[in-house]
Structures are given as C-alpha cells and as structure tokens.
Amino acid sequence: MGDDSSIDGRKARGRKRRAEIIEATLAVIQRDGAAGVTHRTVAKEAGIPVSLSTYYFATLDDLLVAALTSIVEAYSTRIRHIIDHADDKVRGLAELIAESAGPGRDRALAERELSTLAARRPALRPIARRWREGVAELARHCTDSPEAVTALVAASDGLCAAILIDNAPSDIDYVHAVLRHALGLSAETAQG
Amino acid sequence: MGDDSSIDGRKARGRKRRAEIIEATLAVIQRDGAAGVTHRTVAKEAGIPVSLSTYYFATLDDLLVAALTSIVEAYSTRIRHIIDHADDKVRGLAELIAESAGPGRDRALAERELSTLAARRPALRPIARRWREGVAELARHCTDSPEAVTALVAASDGLCAAILIDNAPSDIDYVHAVLRHALGLSAETAQG
DNA sequence: GTACTACTTGTACTATCGTCCAAACATGTC
DNA sequence: GACATGTTTGGACGATAGTACAAGTAGTAC
C-alpha cells in the first residue's frame, strides 16, 4: 500500500491522485450532499485545479460512481465482518443502523442520496444494489424465508431513512427489536 | 372549485396560477427528478415567464415544499381510505406499494427524492414526516406493538426503494407477505 | 542528450442558475 | 373617470456550471 514507485512512478502517482480526488468527493458529499458535487467543489476540496479533476474523472457520473463504490465497499466490509464473527447477527446490523443517528450520519446520508440518485442514473445502480445484497446475505443467515430476507433488507433501509430524516428513535435495543419484527420473529420468542 | 371570480377575481386567478405552477413542478420532478427543479424549468413547463414563478414562490424551497405537500396529501388520502374502508389493511398498503413498479413509479420516485432532500432542507422535513405518520397510523390498526409499527413503516419505505432502484419483485402477493413479516406476523398464522 | 508518455496547469467558452426590478396590465372600488 | 391592489412581463445582474484546449512539467526508455 506504500511506495510502488519502483514499478511505474507515473501510474503510481496517478492512482494516488485518483484516491485523493475520491476522498475529496466524499468530503463534499458529506458536507453539501450529492447535489453539491461538481468538478469545481471537488477540486477545491482536494486543493487541485479543476482540470485535474476532469482529467481523472471525465464526467460527474464517473466521480459519483467512484464515491458510491467507496462507501458501499466500506459498508460491505462491516457487514461481512458481522456475518463471519458476530454471535447475534441481527444485533450487529442493528448497531450498524443505530450509528446513522450519530457518527455514521454523514456516511448514511451520503449513501441514501447516492442510492436515490441511482434511480435516475443507471451507472450508479449496480453499486447501489450491492448494499442490499450484503444485508440480504446477512439476513439469509438468520432466516430461511425469502420474504423475511426482503423484509429485513427493506426495514434496514427504511429505518436508516427514518433516523436520518425524522430523528426516529435509534437506541440499539429498539432498533434490534424492530429488525426482529421485520424478520418475522416476535419479541417473545427470545433471541437466537 | 369553479368560478369564484364573483368574490375576488384577482385572488382567484392567483390561486389558479399557484396550482398550475405546482402541477408544472410535479411534472418536472417526474421527468428530471428533484434536482431538475429550477425556476426556469418550472416556468417553461408551465408556459409562463420566469419571474412569474418567482412571484408566487420566492425561493426554490417554497416550490419544493408545495410540491412535496401535494404528493404527500394525495398519498395520505389513499392511506386514509385504506384505513377506513379496506378489510385487509396490510394488503391495501401492499397494493399501494406495488404501484411503485408501474404507474405510480414517477410519483414514488419523486416522493423519495424529496424525502431524501428533506434530510438537508429542514423546510421539507415536517412534510416528509407526514407520509410516515400516515403509514404508522395504518399500522396501529394492525398491531399493538410499537416496534411492529416502526418495522412496517420502515419496510414500506425500504420496499419502495428496492422496487424503484433494484427492480425488486413487486407482485402484490409477495409485497403483502413481506409486509406481514415486517409486522411480526408469520405467513403461517393465516390472515386476519 | 532526445523521444515518449503521463501528469498538471491556467484559462476561456457557452450555458444556466437564483434573484431582482421597473414597467405594464388586469381587476375591483370609488 | 381616478385610484389601489394584485398580476404579469421582459430584461438584467453576478455567480457558477460542464467542458475543452494549448502549454508546461515530470518521470521513463533509449
């Protein structure tokens, strides 16, 4: 991950620049929303001239795709970690969702904005789909019912929205209980 | 609803213009998305000069608030109708959601875009909240559990998103089954 | 050194944006 | 008729957008 300049210094610098620009794009999205992403705002955030931003990302879609990919991959990594290591996977998901009210708000908001944007920009669609796929895979470890899987994925999305937009309750126990309902498990059936 | 010109022709004309502009705004949103709403695009859609649009809606927020209000109120009316008249209220909601795949796609998409926008523009927030409130009230007719109510509202939102963005299955029976899971009712418990 | 490629920069073009404003028009009151 | 109020119009302002392009710099191969 460090100095690959021994291979090809030019291309290595290019990759680094690319990463910098993506990071700047994420910062802009978190501050001003997906609508605030322009070549100029990104370039300003990264401290580079505008034409350098367009050199690496010819169109705005390219930039948004890269940003959404970055967000979703970070999310998928965490989901994967829950699937592999968490005892109570639903609770792990609940913790992830509950973060949307606090430190993870910017990220969750950015994800929702980009995901909403995906409905109009086909380029974003396959990446937006990946988040759902990750949660769905987690859900399949918790139930055999396809409907329950869909319900959990949908409820996760909707809960994030409610927390982000309506300041819905976000304490973990409550989110956990809601997700269990979505799975078709009543609260009384205990946990397991 | 017809000719009130006997009362005050000027104000009546103003109200009509306002309605026309809101309708044009909805058309723009359905065609180009919420991001496509500008004073100019709306004015062009309505066939009026730009300054007439700004005369009735000084800021873009005013325009978006009016548009979102219009959408949510139409939705709320249908939810209310389900609550008051439907035998199986969950199925009624399922039918409403399933429409997002077909004729209701534009409206559902517009609602999601504006609702997402609400996370950044406080002016839109109370109106965005109303949709959730409507579904929540319907849910309270189906269950006593607060968590189940939240789960149904969240699942409804998330299902719409999945249908809009990922072309998720949208046949009514399936949506119905998913919503029942969200309510914490297993499929085997029969319906009622 | 030269040649080549990748990277970087400044600048300019056209288009559109939100917003404002003064003047004209329509309508209702007197 | 005069007058007030609400409506409508065209045009302008500065700011910012996506995009393109020629020129310059740095790294690599010969």
Image (cartoon, coloured by chain):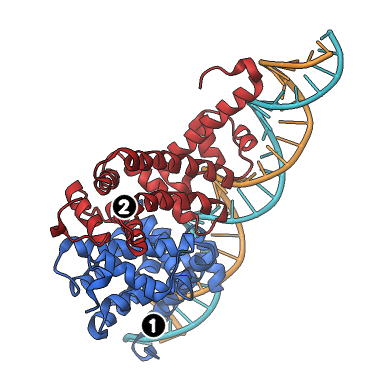
Chain colours: A red, B blue, C cyan, D orange
Locate residue B149 relative to residue A68 in the image: left or right: left
Circle count? 2
Q: Nearer the viewer, residue A38 or A127?
A: A127
Q: Chain of mark 2?
A: A
Tell me which residue sits at (30%, 38%) in the image: A85
Q: Which amino acid does the dot numbered 2 rest on?
A: Cys
CA gap, disc 1 and disc 2? 43 Å
Locate residue B73 relative to residue B26 in the image: left or right: left
Q: In this picture, is A156 found above or below B145?
A: above
Q: Nearer the viewer, residue B97 or A28?
A: B97
Disc number for residue B84: none
Tell me which residue sits at (56%, 56%) in the image: A122
User: Dot 1 corresponds to which residue?
Assistant: B12
Q: Are marks 1 and 2 on the same chain?
A: no
Give the image location of residue A175, x and y in percent.
Answer: 22, 52
Q: Residues within 10 Å of mark 2 (few under 14, many from 20)?
A: many
Q: Secondary structure at mark 2?
A: helix
Give the image location of residue B172, x and y in percent.
Answer: 39, 75
Tell me which residue sits at (25%, 55%) in the image: A179
Q: Is residue A116 visible?
A: yes
Disc number for residue A160: 2
Q: Which amino acid does the dot numbered 1 rest on?
A: Ala
Tell me which residue sits at (31%, 56%) in the image: A143
Q: In this picture, is A131 found above or below B6?
A: above
Q: Looking at the image, is mark 1 or mark 2 nearer the viewer?
A: 2
